[in-house]
Image (tube, grey):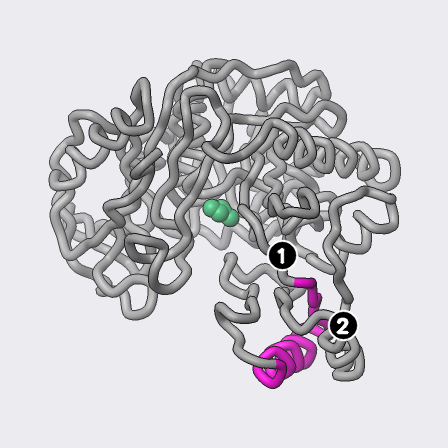
Amino acid sequence: MMKVLIVGHGAREHAIAKSLAESDVELYAAMGRRNPGIAGLSKSVEIMDINDPRLYKKFKNMDIAFIGPESALATGVTDRLQELGVQVMGPTKETAKLEWSKAYTREFVDDQGIDGNPAFRVCRSMRDIRGFLKEHPDVAAKPDVLTGGKGVMITGEHLHGASEVEAYAAERIRSDGLVVLEEKLRGDEFTLQAFTDGKRVEVMPLVRDYKRAYDGDQGPNTGSMGSYSCPDHGLPGLSEVSIRKGTAIMKRTVKKLADSVDRYKGVLYGGFMDTERGVYLIEYNSRFGDPEAMNVLSLLRSPLLDVGWQIVDGRLSTPAFEKKATVCVYLVPDGYPVEPKRDTPVTINPPRNSELFFASVHEEAGEIRTTTSRAIALLAKGRSVSEARERVYSDVPLIEGELFHRTDIGAGV
Ligand code: GLY
């Protein structure tokens, strides 16, 4: 039987593991902390530092590995597994640089003549920072390291006035040697997730996620509180033209990367801003989004294992997705993300109308308890977003504990 390694321990990886388990496989899991959902599907589980490539020798007899989180891609876990003779569905360290270095990506996109960058400067001094702010007082300031989505600071939202921008940018230069300043883009954000074998780029159904903690897009930013997708695989208000423009930027990036660096093999996630002046690239991620993975994988009709093999073999064909809507809702500890209540018990009554994905919980004497991060995701499908919404919210009360959730995921769609 085929031996498949899954790396990671969140709800995204639980979704990947569930999809893989639909094929005839033996699943092995490398996790930083025990995810009871993934563990239940796996023949064996290693709790380890998943970001340390030196610890992967024990997996040398795997046939293929699926890597979930960007942190492991950024440290070269793909490269290490490939050295050990394991095929990997996930980019190498060099190609995953599209996510782990914002400066690299902006410069690559410009150097390769790909149309998609806003005005930006890679700043290494106060002089650079002040020079850019003179031309563009409203900016997005981006660290050049992985920050789990929490490091980007935007004028008017997180930073107020030039002095706050200067102070933050200077702090990043002190810690990382540089910071990327970009003109602040105004418009509608959208993301495209695509499978790619480094040549072909196959876009998945579009998903909208909700980053703010509270209803009405209020409160602090989070890892995301939920997401929805539509039966036609598009998003309300987003034109075909904009989707085509975003897809074209991704296709050119993959092609130029193959020509000048290496073939990017895995999932590429493009964040875009649809503005009055056109579509701009906000950033790339080198993996499935979380929670977006739950939405698209629940619709994927082609076995994920087959898609993975097609990617590593460089013969990707168009995957099939069900024409249904999905709504995913995260249940998170009270106080999340500022002062999350950790170690409180969670009672799970089996969901009736939705699927459950474990995110960050720990088990103690058979009891599931919260950590400081998102605990559990529920996802339902339906013929419409409102049907999927009704189904998922009908199951939320079955998860009992000191938890909260947003009540407006997919509302009004
Ligand atoms: N949902 C956003 C991300 O995974 O980066």
CA gap, disc 1 and disc 2: 14 Å
Q: Residue at x 38, y 56 (%)?
A: 212
The residue beneath circle 1 is 185
Residue 62 horizontal side relative to residue 391, left or right? right
How dense is the environment of label 2, judged by Cα within 10 Å: few (below 14), some, or many (20 and up)?
few
Q: Which residues are magenta?
A: 162-183
Tag on residue 83?
Answer: none
Question: Was residue 164 drawn as part of the magenta stretch in this picture?
Answer: yes
Looking at the rendered structure, the kind of residue marked 1 is Leu
The reply to whether residue 61 is in sight is no
Instruction: Please tell me which of labels 1 and 2 falls first in the chain.
Output: 2
Residue drawn where x is 15% and y is 46% of the image: 366
Q: Ligand 1: does it lie within 8 Å of the C-beta at label 1?
A: no
Task: Look at the numbered disc 2 and give the secondary structure of its residue.
Answer: helix
The quarter of the rendered structure image containing the C terminus is top left
Does 314 appear above or below 248? above
Q: Is residue 226 left or right of residue 387?
A: right
Image location of residue 60, percent across then percent down:
60, 34
Do the residues bearing badges 1 and 2 touch, measured as CB atoms within 8 Å? no
Residue 248 place in picture, x, y as percent: 73, 32
Q: Residue furthest front?
A: 276
Residue 21 % position (x, y) = 40, 22
**Residue 330 position within the rendered picture, expressed as x and y whole percent measured from the top left:** 30, 45
Residue type indicated by callout 2 = Glu
Q: Nearer the viewer, residue 404 or 28?
A: 404
Residue 56 counted in the magenta span: no
Q: Which residue is mark 2?
A: 135
